[in-house]
Image (tube, rainbow, N blue to C red):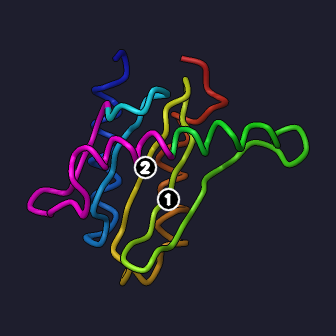
Amino acid sequence: MPFSGSFEQLCDNIFALSSNIRFVGIISGMGDLVAGGMRAGMQSMEDRENSSKLYLEFVLRSEMRKDQDAEFGKTVYSFSEREKIKFAVFPLLRNHLLMVSMEKKEPNHDGLIKNILNLTSEYDTHTNF
């Protein structure tokens, strides 16, 4: 994992954006968590096995979206709001994904997403490391 140090710093910087951020993680193209995790003192909504399934689901969705890159351009981020939580997923270099979950009560997820995009600009899919 050649980027794990800088990935950990990225996760810490994203956590600092809002106390409503529950989880920040870097997921490999194989669906493994390689950096980050739950905010200290916060309990995950799912068990460890279901976390792994969730990571893999986001990887598969991201790969499937690439089929439309020629028509629509590359995915900048994807966002979903569920009954209990909000998710934002950002493609990063070398088939990694940044996954962020936040409390449903977060009033400014658009602003958070813009700030996260600024923080991830050096890790985006257009950068060659």
Q: Residue at x 52, y 62 (%)?
A: 113
Camera-side residue of 10 and 96: 96
Residue 85 place in picture, x, y as percent? 38, 72
Q: Amino acid at mark 1?
A: Ala
Indicate which disc, 2 or 1, sits on the residue closer to the N terminus: 1
Q: How many marks?
A: 2
Q: Which residue is mark 2?
A: 99
Residue drawn 62% across and 32% down? 125
Q: Which residue carries the number 1 mark?
A: 88
Q: Secondary structure at mark 2?
A: strand
Q: Amino acid at mark 2?
A: Met
Residue at 82 percent of width and 44 percent of height? 73
Q: Quadrant of the N terminus?
A: top left
The spot of residue 56 in percent (x, y) is 45, 39
Q: Is 13 situated left or right of 75 in this image?
A: left
The x and y percentages for residue 92 are 54, 35
C-alpha separation, residue under disc 2 versus residue under disc 1? 6 Å
Q: Which residues are magenta?
A: 34-57
Q: Is residue 83 magenta?
A: no
User: Which secondary structure lies at badge 1?
Assistant: strand
Quarter of the rendering containing residue 18: bottom left
Q: Residue at x 54, y 67 (%)?
A: 80
Q: Is residue 35 located in the magenta-colored stretch of the structure?
A: yes
Q: Is residue 32 left or right of residue 77?
A: left
| Residue 26 sits in quarter | top left
Instruction: Give coordinates of residue 46: x percent, y percent.
Output: 25, 58
Looking at the image, is 10 positioned above or below residue 19? above
Within 10 Å of disc 2 (Cα), the crowding (few <14, some 14-19, many 20+) is: many
Q: Are marks 2 and 1 in contact (CB under 8 Å)?
A: yes
View extreme (left): residue: 41
Disc on res. 96: none
Q: Callout 1 environment at 10 Å: few (<14), some (14 to 19), or many (20+)?
A: some
